[in-house]
Amino acid sequence: MSYLKTMPVLLSGLPLIFLPVSDVAANEEDTASALDPIVVTATLGPKTVGESLSSVTVVDEEDIRRQQPKEFRELIESQPGVTVSGNGSFGKQTGVLMRGHASDATVLLVDGVRIRSATVGGPAWQFLPPQLLNRVEIVRGSRSSLYGADAVGGVVQAFTLPQEKGNHGWVEAGAGNYDSQQYGAGFTSVTEQTSVNIGGNHFRTDGAPVIAGGSDKGYDNTSGVASARHEFDNGVRAGFSFLNAEGNTEYDGGEQDFRFQTAGVNVDVPVTSNWRTSLHLADSRDELEDFSDFPGVFDTRTRSSRLENWLTSGTHEFVLGAEYLVDKVESTTTYDESSRSNEAYFGQALLNFGRTDVHLSLRSDDNEAYGTEETWGAGVGYKLDSNHRVRASAGTSFKAPSFNDLYFPGFGNPDLEPEEAISYETGIEGRYTKWFWDLAVYQSDVEDLSLPTQNQAGSVPEARLRGVELSSGWQHDGWRLKAVASVGDFEDKETERQLARRAEQTVRVDLDKQVGAWGFGTTVRAESHRYEDLFGIGRERIAGYGVWDLRASRTLAPGWRASLSVDNVLDNEYATAKRFDNVDFISAGRTAFLSVRYDFAR
């Protein structure tokens, strides 16, 4: 599916309406647009990847359907600038470290709604169901001047909303080793003015051991999505989106019941021909009940309201907005404070002067827990010719201290200051009819960088995070190739030691070929070593690893398709994190999964 066919326009991150493009466009034009897709996360509104002046990776619907991911991490691990650490496979604690920043220094949005745990500070990446996603945008680099706290490493936005016009439905069932099972179904109806989407999925598995010699640790996740949007005759657009995932995950030492939920409502009003205003109301819930030797309930509810005013003048666009957000924590642990509010005002200018684009942004956050933070961003891009563009950007960002950092009994410090960073980036790209390449060089200087692991508390007074990212893609005659590589240097400036849990070299190659009714594909990933800092033990090395995945699919009849994936074909045992006693948390071995899907349209 080409992004030219239908692409959602997002306002405040919530898709509202589809922009149809002529279905008679040449195949080469469709391919070129798929290689330079429209993205919305980088600038709050629709721009091509090249126009956004940012380092962006898009995982589209075709990628997701081909890979058959069981966990969200499978879509983003080893992408440019992204490393993932986890305490085992299948719903176990997962951290996403972008450009060397900790997992709670990257914002996660679902259809424009921000979700995270206010107690630990970061999102529960492991509970987001990839089976119900249609698209993922990964924006790397500072974005606090648009999204506020925690957008230090970047922003990841997942979309559940449909992208094709017409009435479509699907039913899918599958099974694999580790006694894994999956069932799902959904229906979508999209017209020029109205769209409705509903879907559900259930995945369960007996799981794999998370430490060598351990017992299997199971996981189940029952999830659903719903959304609707409508454009009235007067141009007013309204919509809502909803995602809920809940279940249970077992881990080394206990188990947890969880709920991961987002809901958003958006109204967009055209005031004049060059002014429109948008109001977005959102509610998200991260709920966890732990059953172990130290049981407890840790529930976060976040409510936000966001107003944006979009003004256009010729080829220039301006955004003026305000946002109000409240975090509330309910827990069996008695925190010194159980809620906090944040009031923000922001502005953005997207200026175009022929071949030159200039992006400017400014934001002020006033939080009742840690005070006022001002952030800014600036970027400039120059189009050398019809295929090549250079870009440069800089910006400031900050990560808010969590409720655990500030208020946990006997541990928290209410005077703790936010982590602050200033980041720089330069890049050059080439985009052609059938292929593209992009090269980016970046550096972030961070004060009071928080440590990303449960094994060590505290922060690094000064850290320097720098690196190089290279990505390329090619499509032709049924072939589809994506290749990326990253090299980083993430160090404590005082000790010059590599920061914990960060792999500094990564590479990923995805190659697929369609041959008639058959589809074949493979993914190869490799990451270098990393370190873990353990209380009372010191620094321990975690070896690097490589993983080889295979997949195949076949159209059985009109609408019917069978898919087989074999992950970790060579059955490698590898780890990305250690337990407090220096025992490796290991990932699952060879994993096979067979599914049958029926797609129907009317």
Image (cartoon, rainbow, N blue to C red):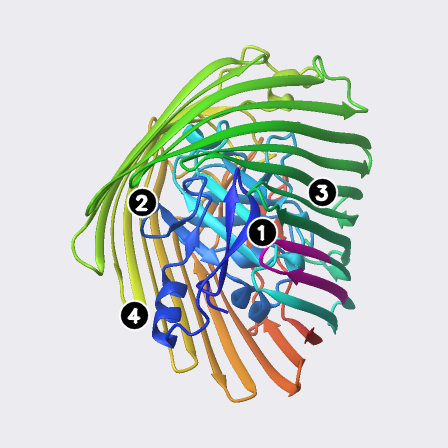
The nearer-to-camera label among 4 and 3 is: 4
Circle 3: element type? strand
Q: Name the kind of residue labelled 3 in the image.
A: Phe
The mark that comes first in sequence, 1 or 2, is: 2
Write down the quadrant of residue 358 in the picture.
top left
Q: Which residue is mark 2?
A: 53
Residue 238 placed where, x, y %?
63, 42
| Distance CA(mark 1)–CA(mark 2) | 22 Å
Q: Are marks 2 and 4 in contact (CB under 8 Å)?
A: no
| Distance CA(mark 4)–CA(mark 3) | 40 Å
Q: Name the kind of residue labelled 4 in the image.
A: Thr
Q: Which residue is mark 4?
A: 433
Q: Name the kind of residue labelled 1 in the image.
A: Phe
Above/below status of 285 relative to 474: above
The mark that comes first in sequence, 2 or 3, is: 2
Q: Which residue is mark 1?
A: 159
The mark that comes first in sequence, 4 or 3, is: 3
| Distance CA(mark 4)–CA(mark 1) | 27 Å
Q: Which residues are magenta?
A: 182-198
Residue density around tag 4, few if under 14, some if 14–19, many if 20 or more, within 10 Å: some
Q: Which residue is mark 3?
A: 260
